[in-house]
Image (cartoon, grey):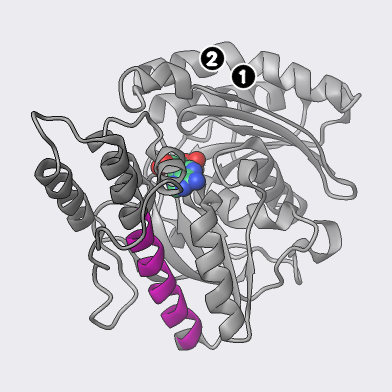
Amino acid sequence: MKVLGIETSCDETGIALYDSEHGLLADALFSQVQMHAEYGGVVPELASRDHVQRVLPLIQSVLSSAGLDSSAIDGIAYTAGPGLIGALMVGSCTAQALAYTWGVPALGVHHMEGHLLAPMLEEKPPQFPFVALLVSGGHTQLVEVDGIGDYRLLGESLDDAAGEAFDKAAKMMELDYPGGPRIAAMAQQGAAGRFRFPRPMTDRPGLDFSFSGLKTFTLNTVARHSHDGVCDQQTKADICRAFEEAVVETLVIKCRRALQQTGLKRLVIAGGVSANQRLREGLGAMAHKLGGELFYARPEFCTDNGAMIAYAGCQRLQAGEREALGAKPQPRWPMEQLKPLIVANAGGSSDG
Ligand code: KG4
Ligand code: ZN
């Protein structure tokens, strides 16, 4: 089955073609990052307008790089939520109109399920069950995953998401949007040990997170080390290093707890922040110590992309899921509302 995937939930137009027999055939992405950088964050109205401009040309280019035309497509998967409503509407209208015209089913996919399953696109996909840490710009969640759609929330952020904390901290140091990659790059020049940031909520039991305190701590540290409102580059790098270490160590502590609590050995990280090298190293070492293993997607499939939506949609369409004509996007859509897929072992082992 060949499924076209359309991702337009935020500031990236991602298109891909996934084949249940041959894997990923082609993918393309247009990132609006430059356009939004000027405003220090995503401007929803501009995002929607840009998706309109990009979506069809990108679909055309994905089909042509796969050497296929529309008659080869068996289904269309699109991100139905969560995300920015205007941006989601572009993807859902495009997907539903094309599906109607081509006489194939369309299916709305949950954006975080897409992220969660992105590591299935890699050469060595994780087997179910596993613990997943979802760390994106909008979500920080620990989930026990028994199969596609079979999710049990173990813990989540009570305030800011991890990626959001990176973005806000970066803004305080006048680093461009998105802040995660900027902070990671600056941190490489930073000295270890000059600053120590708190590891929020690690001194009490439980698997929830809180990152808003780190924001205040960053703001105060920047202010204390600024002269005439200016913070020098080395100090910024040292702050970035301490900030990144604090976020990573906090995530490592909670993931260790989640593995111990569930007795599971496999840990999957997904979402934009899972591209972070220090996080991958920290979690990899921790999982190894417990006799377990860490899985993640290639960096371009950690952040928003069409491949993860094509993959997730393909699994569900193959299992026979269908939606009514005119299905609505869902800007708020708790992942626990998803239903388990009714096929035996639909994981990546057979067609990843
Ligand atoms: O998954 P994603 O592309 O979009 C959402 O669904 O939110 O995640 C974007 C988030 C941003 O907050 C960005 O700063 C963060 O992922 N991010 C990173 C890195 N690359 C992206 N954070 C830390 N280190 C990175 N290397
Ligand atoms: Zn995302």
User: Where is residue 90 shown, x and y percent of the image?
Assistant: 51, 22
Q: Quadrant of the N terminus?
A: top right
Which residue is at 85% across, 63% downward? 350
User: Where is residue 48 shown, x and y percent of the image?
Assistant: 44, 19
Which residue has dot 1 on it?
55
User: Where is residue 104 shown, x and y percent of the image?
Assistant: 76, 32
Q: Is residue 79 left or right of residue 176?
A: right
Tell me the kind of residue under disc 2: Val
Q: Is residue 68 above or below residue 309?
A: above
Q: Are marks 1 and 2 in contact (CB under 8 Å)?
A: yes
Which residue is at 65% across, 45% downward? 308
Number of residue marks: 2
Q: Is residue 104 above or below residue 59?
A: below
User: Where is residue 270 shown, x and y percent of the image?
Assistant: 55, 55
- Residue 68 shows up from this direction: yes
Which residue is at 38% across, 38% downward? 179
Question: Within the image, what quadrant is residue 339 found in?
Answer: bottom right
Disc 1 crowd, CA 10 A, few/some/many (<14, 14-19, 20+): many
Q: Distance between the Cα atoms at labels 1 and 2?
A: 6 Å
* 249 within the magenta span: yes
Q: Which mark is residue 323?
A: none
Q: Which mark is residue 52?
A: 2
Determine whether the residue tagged by mark 2 lies in a helix, strand or loop. helix
First to last magenta residue range:
244-260
Determine whether the residue tagged by mark 1 lies in a helix, strand or loop. helix
Tell me the kind of residue under disc 1: Val
- Find out if the beta carbon at label 1 lies less than 8 Å from the nearest ligand 2 atom: no
